[in-house]
């Protein structure tokens, strides 16, 4: 499975051990390269074998092959239900993409969602999920109903499910 459209070229370059352009994948590579280089013995074969054995013993990778028509965002939500805590904005993003047809997801991400996310990047270029979550919460509270911060996603989901039809491009255009 490939990452989001905007990270695919970097991802492919990293896998093929080519120069990776500035972006999320390049930042991740720099982070892990720096962290691994600080480990004691990482410059020896024994140290690298020890790191490899640690990773193999404690890290699980899951590969899921989707059949035509299966929605990766719906599967992600069910798999992550007992995993790492996601921000309310992460849950909202996943929910929105669950309802965008698979054939339209790259276009929607590129032309709509990415533009929305641009408003919530920190000075270091990382997406601030807390600020984005607060934005969604404030947007929904503008209707006059108090929403606790930890209920932002649940209220977004309820609001969306109560609607008979949601045109996400219109919602994103309104939020820009």
Image: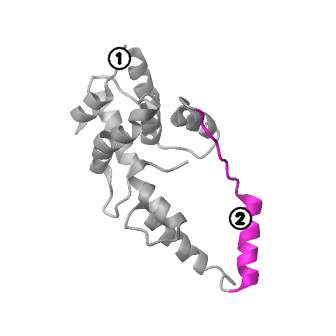
The picture places residue 143, in percent across and down from the top left corner, at 27, 23
Q: Say whether residue 171 is left or right of residue 69.
A: left
Please report contact status of discs 2 and 1: CB closer than 8 Å, yes or no: no
Q: Residue at x 39, y 41 (%)?
A: 106
Q: Which secondary structure lies at badge 2?
A: helix
> Is residue 46 highlighted in magenta?
yes
Vertical placement of 98 versus 34: above or below?
above
Q: Say whether residue 46 is left or right of residue 11.
A: right
Front-most of residues 42 and 66: 66
Q: Which residues are magenta?
A: 44-67
Q: Residue at x 48, y 60 (%)?
A: 11
The picture places residue 150, in percent across and down from the top left corner, at 47, 35
Dot 2 crowding, Cα within 10 Å, few <14, some 14–19, many 20+: few
Q: CA distance from mark 2 to mark 1?
A: 46 Å
Q: Check residue 165 in the rendering and tell me which mark sits there, or answer none.
A: 1
Q: Which residue is mark 2?
A: 55
Front-most of residues 70 and 174: 70
Q: Earlier in the sequence, mark 2 or mark 1?
A: 2
Dot 1 crowding, Cα within 10 Å, few <14, some 14–19, many 20+: few
Vertical placement of 43 versus 58: above or below?
below
Figure disc tally: 2
Q: Check residue 12 in the rendering and tell me which mark sits there, or answer none.
A: none
Vertical placement of 53 versus 37: above or below?
above
Q: Would you identify the image quadrant in which residue 27 lies?
A: bottom left
Q: Residue at x 72, y 80 (%)?
A: 47
> Is residue 75 highlighted in magenta?
no
Q: Which secondary structure lies at badge 1?
A: loop
Front-most of residues 54 and 15: 15
């Amino acid at each position: 499975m490939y990452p989001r459209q905007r990270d695919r070229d970097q991802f492919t370059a990293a896998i093929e051990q080519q120069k990776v352009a500035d972006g999320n994948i390049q930042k991740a590579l720099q982070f892990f390269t720096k962290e691994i280089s600080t480990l004691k013995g990482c410059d020896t074969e024994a140290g690298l074998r020890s790191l490899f054995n640690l990773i193999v013993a404690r890290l699980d990778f899951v590969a899921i092959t989707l059949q035509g028509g299966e929605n990766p965002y719906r599967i992600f939500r069910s798999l992550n239900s007992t995993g790492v805590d996601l921000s309310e904005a992460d849950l909202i993003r996943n929910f929105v993409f669950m309802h965008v047809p698979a054939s339209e997801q790259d276009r929607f991400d590129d032309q709509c969602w990415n533009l929305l996310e641009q408003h919530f990047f920190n000075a270091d270029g990382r997406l601030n999920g807390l600020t984005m979550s607060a934005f969604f919460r404030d947007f929904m509270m503008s209707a006059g109903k108090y929403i606790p911060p930890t209920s932002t996603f649940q209220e977004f989901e309820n609001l969306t499910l109560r609607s008979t039809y949601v045109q996400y491009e219109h919602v994103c255009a309104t939020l820009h």
